[in-house]
Image (cartoon, grey):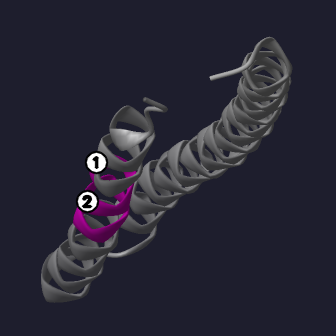
Amino acid sequence: MSSKDAEKKQRKLARLEQLKQAMRSETESMVEQVKSDVETRKNDIQQIVEVINSSGQELDEAFEGEASEAAQTNVTKLKSKNIGMNTDFEFLVDSFEVY
């Protein structure tokens, strides 16, 4: 291989490395943005759970007997679903990794 060919190959390799680094940087940036968005949603879910808890306490005080039990059952179901969503979001955030 001539020195011209070797130089040309080196330039191509350097350019490919630059492109690789640029793509990696862009991908990492995108992943970080998505992680941030997911974290925001996770916080939203936590706020929803807090509102559900507060509402459950208010319902418990407002109703008696079977009505109170039914309200608490529904609140517990809502809370469980939202906690499940929160767990899913945590798994999603943990699964983001750029190699």
Element at label 1: helix
- Give me the residue at 75% from left, 44% from top: 30
Q: Mark 2 points at which residue?
A: 84
Tell me: residue 56, above or below residue 74: above
Q: Mark 1 points at which residue?
A: 87
Is 84 inside the magenta-drawn segment? yes
Element at label 2: helix
Image quadrant where residue 3 sits: top right
- Of residues 55 and 88, the one nearer the viewer is 88
- Give me the residue at 73% from left, 27% from top: 9
- Give me the residue at 25% from left, 59% from top: 84
CB-based contact (under 8 Å), mark 1 and mark 2:
yes
Is 49 inside the magenta-drawn segment? no
- Of residues 76 and 88, the one nearer the viewer is 88
Q: In this view, does 35 lie to the left or right of 8?
A: left
**What secondary structure prevails in the magenta region?**
helix
Extent of the magenta region: 80-87
Tell me: residue 27, above or below residue 5: below
